[in-house]
Image (cartoon, rainbow, N blue to C red):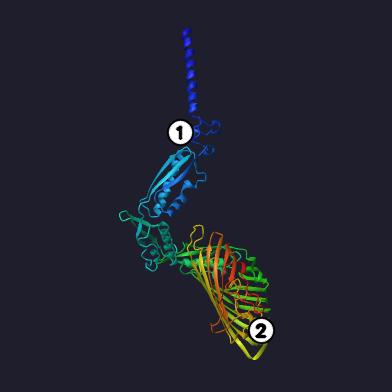
Amino acid sequence: MQYSLRYKVLRRIYFFCFACVCCCVTAYSNVPKDLNTGAITNRTEHEGLRNESNSPVFQDVSEVKRILYKVEFRGEVPTILLQELKKQSSLLQEKTHTFACLEMAQKKVKFDERIFTNICFKNGYFDVEINSDIIQTQQCFVIVFNIILGQRYVVSKTILKGDKNIDNKKSKWSILNNISKGEYIDFTKINVVKHKIKTILQNNGYYFAEVEDPCIDIDRESKTATVTYFYRGKKLVKISDIKIVGANDVPKSFILKRMYLKKGELLLLPLLKISQRDLLGSGLFSEVKIVGEIDQTRNAYDNYQEAILNVNVITAPPRAIGVGAYFSVTDGPIITAIWQNKNFLKKAHDVGTIIRGGTTGLTATAFYNIPFREHTDFHADIAMKHMNTIAYEGDKISSTVGFIKKIQHSKHNITLSFLPTIETGTLTRTYSLQQTLFGFAVNVKMDFSNNYIYPSSGIIMDFNCQPYFGKFRKIADQQFTESENVHAMAIFTGSMRTYFPLLTSSSTIAANSNVLASFVSLGYIAIKDLEYTPFDKRFYGGGRTSIRAYGYQLCGDLDQEDRPVGGTSLLEICVEPRIRISKDWGVVTFYEASRISSRTSTSNVRILSGIGFGIRYFTKFGPIRFDIGIPLDRRNSQKDTNKMVDKPFQFYISVGQSF
């Protein structure tokens, strides 16, 4: 009995010691160790650690020491494609470039393999093979992607399939020629054509047209692919009603007069965009959205269906106050202030004043515009001028009343104006001349550029005819010859500005931001002689809006006092490459030349020219520009032969494009 009791006690002690040893061994095996060195870490710092499938998993991986990694690409991969692979890689997008464990690295690598395969497919590499390997070192993971692109597939043909009721003339679908036979497969370009097909349908009245994702049929033997587009034009869409939402303070009649879409007409996408742009251009709205929806109350006919046009607008504050300024070496600072109310009397009347003053004079103008008919405004203004230029001095008051009409088609804007005017005043140029004139201005402006503030392609043409009637007296030797009076003259001017896009080398810069800009300006005054022409009606050159290498009014013939004479004929040209070096900054260089004369013959007429460069800071309301113009034909003073009339350079600070 004693033996039995002793045996039981010893057996319990033995089992107790064995259990303690097992617990210690188990506890030691579960102690967290450093992933790089294997050293035991403090258990209290990693309470979330547990062991599953021989892989450490953490509740908060940021609390452990993570392993660095780097990515390598191997294989013959074009530079452009390699840049895209690196840009889309989820591994390279990680800010820390670390992993907590090998299992996490493997998941990321597989994810990147799928991304890379998709990128290669979109560029026509349908036989691409991508193998990855993870090399674990003591310092970091080395992730290697072995890429075998294979041969790049080319387009064998492009097919367009769709509804039979739509006109399938080749001229209409010439957009398909953008993808030519033998061209490498590029999904970006293929999708651009898809969107353009939909635009063509909407431009021709199929507003609710749909275009499916293109089908790519691959021929692995010939390494070619057939691109097939499927479209459903549905039916032509006519407008059954126009609903206006949000115009609480603006008359709805004003909006309807600015719309190029009417009830009963086809819903054409270009006219919709023009209407939206015209309403935004009025300045009365901060946001305009025009959307068509199917009219559920009307039945669809065989050839067309009807839709409701919803015009959603958000009105903007109608009153505005603005201040502008520019500086030039010759003129000094010129300051402009404007006050405007574009919704006067809550009838969409546009009223305002503009005051511009500087060393060359002071001008105050008050104007009033009233919506008259569709796209036509009644315009009236009165201006008072005090002029103190190098060519003449004096005071004048003028008034204009007439009509301005806008015609818009697609991306093109045409403005027609007929503005009768009457003006009276006294001008002095060593002698005074008081004059009252009546005339009218007929202006045609055609804007075929792609952007109002930053044009990068297109052309702008401006033609103006201004007949004047009154008493034009000849001035000879500061004496008026009454018997030789002339009672009429006409001023003809025309200008053409062109913009050609240049190649853009950086993806961070807006497309077509590099531009070759140029302008040509012509003018002619139909009158008996220069001496009959009023001082302020003559042509002068030079300054920030003319030949920048010469001072204001100084680009032309000078008299014995070095004062500009002016002329009855004008020719100005300019070439200006505009290069955008970053999102906010750009540089320009320019060459300009001018010929101003009162002679009918071009012989012995001096052409003045200049070169220059400038810096541009781009803003939403236009570029802030810094220009330096250098004259190539500096002239000696006739008063003092030891001096030069033209300064060695002209410096300008202004806002807006030079032209």
Where does label 2 land, which residue? Answer: 435
- Residue 113 left/right relative to 49: left
Residue 293 location (% of width, % of height):
48, 62
The kind of residue tagged 1 is: Glu
Residue 199 location (% of width, % of height):
44, 64
Q: Residues within 10 Å of mark 1 (few under 14, many from 20)?
A: few
Which of pointers 1 and 2 indicates the residue nearer the eye? 2
Q: Quadrant of residue 452?
A: bottom right
Q: CA distance from mark 1 to mark 2?
A: 102 Å
Where does label 1 land, which residue? Answer: 52
Residue 155 location (% of width, % of height):
35, 59
Q: Is residue 602 above or below residue 294?
A: below
Q: Is residue 225 above or below residue 408?
A: above
Labels 1 and 2: the sequence-earlier one: 1
Residue 582 location (% of width, % of height):
54, 59
Q: Residue at coordinates 47% horizontally, 64% vertically from top-left?
A: 307
Q: Are marks 1 and 2 in contact (CB under 8 Å)?
A: no
Q: Quadrant of residue 178?
A: bottom left
Q: Residues within 10 Å of mark 2 (few under 14, many from 20)?
A: some
Q: Most extreme residue toward the top, as rendered? A: 1
- Considering the numbered disc 1 on the image, is that residue within a helix, a strand or a loop? strand
Q: Most extreme residue toward the left, as rendered? A: 221
Q: Is residue 19 above or below residue 69?
A: above
The kind of residue tagged 2 is: Gln
User: Toward the viewer: 593 or 123?
Assistant: 593
Number of numbered callouts drawn: 2
- Considering the numbered disc 2 on the image, is that residue within a helix, a strand or a loop? strand
